[in-house]
Every structure is written in C-alpha cells, then in structure tokens.
Amino acid sequence: MEKQFICIICPRSCPITVDTETMVIKGNKCMRGRQYVNSELTEPRRTLTSTIRIESEKVMLLPVKTDRPIKKEDLFAAMKKISKISVKAPIKIGEIIVSDFIEDGTNLISTKTILK
Amino acid sequence: MHKSVVIIGGGPAGLAAAIGAYESGVEANDILIIEREKELGGVLNQCVHTGFGLTYFGEELSGGEYASRFIEKIEEYAIPYVTEATVLSVSKSKVIKFVSPQLGYTKVKADAVVLAMGCRERSRGTLNIAGTRPSGIFSAGSAQRFVNIEGYLPGKRIVILGSGDIGLIMARRLTLEGAKVLRVCEMKSHVSGSARNVEQCLNDFDIPLYLNSTVTKIVGEERVTGVVVSKVDENFKPIRGTGELVRCDTLVLSIGLIPENELTTEAGIKLDKKTNGAVVDQYFQTSLSGVFACGNVLHVHDIVDYVTAESINVGKACAGYVKGLIKPNKTKIPFEISDGVKYVVPQTFNFDPKKIDIILKRFVVYFRVSRDYEKAKITITSNGEELLSVIKNNIHSSQMHSVILTKKMAQVIEKNKNAKISVTEA
Ligand code: SF4
C-alpha cells in the first residue's frame, strides 16, 4: 500500500510517498526524511513545548520543552502534568525542570533564562 | 548623544545587524539598539514552539532559545541597548528621537541607522466582515501573547480565519491547552503557512482545514457566539447560499503581516508598493543614504533564519558605511522584474565599479513568485545577456526564494547599468 507523508523535520516540508510493502521511499530530499517516515510508521513522536507558572518579578510564565520527542499519544497526558508544575526564579535556559516527567526517561527543560 | 550605528528594533533583525556591525569592527559602545518591549528578542519571546534555527544552526530551537543565542552575544560583546523605548522620529540627517523610562527624552545622532522594526498583523478592518463588534476576536499573534506570556486562554471554542504559520501554530497550542479549535478557514485554494505546520499542527490533532472559504459574518452582542462561514469563488467572492453558522466564542485571525514602516515613511524614505517595505540596494541601504533596513520591516520572511542571515550582512554593510567604504548617492541601477515575479529585494543596485566586493563577496537576491510553478526557470539577465539560470522544482507563491549574485555577475550589471529577474515555466 502507498502512504503519503509530509516531512516535518525541516522547512522544506518534502512530500514523501512510501510503499509500505517494499518500503521504497520517494520524495525525501535527505536521509532525515527516511528516518521520519520510519518513525511515523512505527511510533510517531513529537517534541512538546508549553509554558509553566513561575514565581518571578518580571514574568508570569516560563517556556519549557521536552528534551526529546515524546510519543504522540502521550501529548495530552504530558500537558496535564505540565499544568500542575510551578517553579521559582532564577531558572537558566536548558535547566531540567522535572526529570523523567512522564516516566519514559524524558526530561522537561526550560527554554529561557529568568534571573529574577 | 552620538553613535556610529543606531538600530531601531531589538528583534531577530536588529540583534543580527548589531552583531554583524560589531564583528566587522564597529566598537560596541558606538552601537545602540533601541527596543520597544521590556526585553530583547522581539516576537521570538512569545514563540514557545520549536522550529527555529534549522537552517541557521542546523538544530531545532524554540523561539526563546533562538533569541537567546543572539542576546548572549550582545551581552558578551557589551553592545548597549535601551528597552521600553519608543522612537518618535528618524530625521533625514539621521537624528533619532526616542523616549524611554531609563533615559527619558533622548536625541541621538547616528552615522548609520538600521531600520529593524519588524511587522504587525493585518486586522479585521482589512477584511470587511459584516456583523457586530463583540469581544472574542483576536489576531493570532495577540492570542499567542495571551497564552504564552500572560497565561490566559482567549476562548474555548475557536474558529481560525487564515492559514498563516502563526495561525497554524496557535491551532495546536490552543488545542493542547484545552480549547476546541473547530476549523481553520482559508480563502485561497492553498495554505499560506508551511506544509509541515499543516501536518504537525492541524493533522496531528484532526483539526479540519476548509479551503476556498471565509468568514462572512460575526454574530454575538457582548461576546462572539458564532461566525458564518461561506465558500468563495475563484475571485474570493462569497458564493450565495453557502453560508453556514458555526457556533464559537472566539475568532482568531491569521491573515497576513504588514511591515511596520511609519518611521520610514515619515523620514521620506522611498517604499516599494509590492513589499510594503523600503526600496533598497544590494547593501540593503534605503533611498536615504546611511539608512539601512532588514528583516520583516523590509519584506515579510517565511522563517527567522533568513532574517538573521540577511541582517548580519546589513550589519556588515553598516560597518562599511561608517568606515567610508560605501560611496553614497551614486546613480542607482533598477532591478527589473518579469511578469512571474511578485517582488525582488534588493530593488536597485549601487555598485562601486572598482570595489564591487569590498564589503560583501556575494549578494543574495530574495524574491517571491506570483503563481505556483511545478518546474520554474529563474534567470537574471543584463542587456539580454544571461547571467544566471537555475531550475527549481515546486516553486510556490507562498514561499520566499533566493538566488546568489557573484562578483562577476555584479560587474556585468554595473557595466550595463541594468538587470532583470524573470521566472518562467521550465
Ligand atoms: S526530507 Fe530532509 S529536506 Fe525534506 S523536509 Fe525532511 S528533513 Fe527537510
């Protein structure tokens, strides 16, 4: 069977077709497109970004992300966990906010430095 | 106050221009960045999503992470900046007047100025939608600000009009935060944002996309209670009898961006009707000598990585100007466009015949096409002589494209005093 994908790995957004029996892949301009299609067919993953509450003089929210893509089906459960987290400044960019926060080894990290 | 280089706007364009100027030899203390918001970074600060930096850094960063790479450099180089500052005017003699809580009313005389004010969103007014004026109508960018900076969800049942990237990103963001995005309506027959955003922001969450359709009426007294969505014909005229009432409490508009050029206009700088930005030469110098423009104030870019690359070069050019390497006010060569080209930047050339490559070794030409091409041939000619010819597949009118002019090509353009860019079906 032929399946269609749009590669989301870079802005070129290559349209990729794959024959799921022979695994012949067409349309990808680079190898990352092949990896993307493989993971879409087996276990689609996405990097989740959001915000959490922060006690700070300047801002209300701290932007965060998962330090690796998580399973697509876990996105909403992860959002639920994120909504309950709050931190206090100072926080550095890249700092782990909660390690292993959805019990699959993924860490939630800060994507901004808030000094005060 | 006197400064060699004053940069108006501390977003991605302004930051990169400052870095470019410093790295080309302008003293940090001779540079000033004037920023309107409380912190540097511009719109990147409210972009918590990732997708930035893939082209420029080869890694995927969030908006804040991307901005911080440049802000850290500004701090490291000790380039001065003033925040919460409003620029009142830029004069022909390059005196910039601004007010800020930190410095009060300030006049600064600059040798070179970089216009890096960015763009703003098109509002409801540009659409002529009938109906009442209730609350609950947001531009995609203000919805983004509410969610990511202020911490409010603008509504629970949402219709998005327009398929720009910010609208697509917000469809996902609002969904993840618990709102129901009922549909995204796009007047055109194709999406304005990128295909990858349709995939990861709409398809991942089963958010329906309605092409060839628009909002023709807004319903509700105090608050939006619904919108009427109608099909449109090929001239974007709503088709009678196709109206459908969609119950919702919020309408988010993602219908395009316009460069913010009030200061530019007041300074008497020539604008290009097609880009809504200044007319510039190959150094991105405007019609006012020593005033440069880069980023979304010049022309709306698809991704910030291109803004950075362009603006670093503008910073370099500023440094060259300050050192007297650019000879101002020479006759300008117009860069003509053929039918298939919507616009080109730069719109003019202003080469120093003996020192064409004194500041930049090669010149990037940015353009958009007026329709989609499966296979397009892009050519640059001068007096009919073909200087450059490339074939590109799947050229879309919603994407920005670029080609590179070498020193050799520039020499021919300078000699012939003319140049033209054409796009045809290959
Ligand atoms: S296949 Fe490669 S070039 Fe094409 S979108 Fe994916 S990552 Fe980008």
Image (tube, coloured by chain):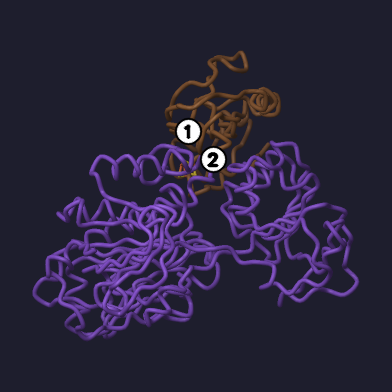
Would you say the beta carbon of the disc 1 residue lies within 8 angstroms of ligand 1? no
- The answer to whether residue A22 shows anywhere in this view is no
Distance (Cα) linking label 2 and label 1: 8 Å
Residue B110 at x, y percent in the picture: 24, 68
Outermost residue, left direction? B354
The chain holding disc 1 is A
Residue A109 at x, y percent in the picture: 50, 25
Q: Nearer the viewer, residue B214 or B422?
A: B214
Residue B382 at x, y percent in the picture: 27, 81
Q: Which residue is drawn at 59% across and 38% down?
A: A18
Give the chain coloured purple.
Answer: B
Q: Name the residue under label 1.
A: A111
Q: How crowded is mark 2: few (under 14 residues within 10 Å), some or many (20 or more)?
A: many
Say the numbered circle drawn on residue B48: 2
- A99 up-or-down from B414: above or below: above
Of the 4 image quadrants, the one containing the C terminus of chain A is: top left
In the figure, is residue A58 to the left or right of B230? Answer: left
The chain holding disc 2 is B
In the figure, is residue B59 to the left or right of A80? Answer: left
Q: Kindly check if marks 2 and 1 are in contact, taking CB atoms under 8 A apart as contact.
A: yes
- B215 up-or-down from B19: above or below: below
Of the 4 image quadrants, the one containing the N terminus of chain A is: top right
Q: Which of the 4 image quarters holds residue B365?
A: bottom left
In the figure, is residue A70 to the left or right of B307? Answer: right
Give the chain coloured brown.
Answer: A
Q: Which of A89 and A99 is in front in this view?
A: A89
Disc 1 marks which amino acid? Thr
Residue B362 at x, y percent in the picture: 22, 62
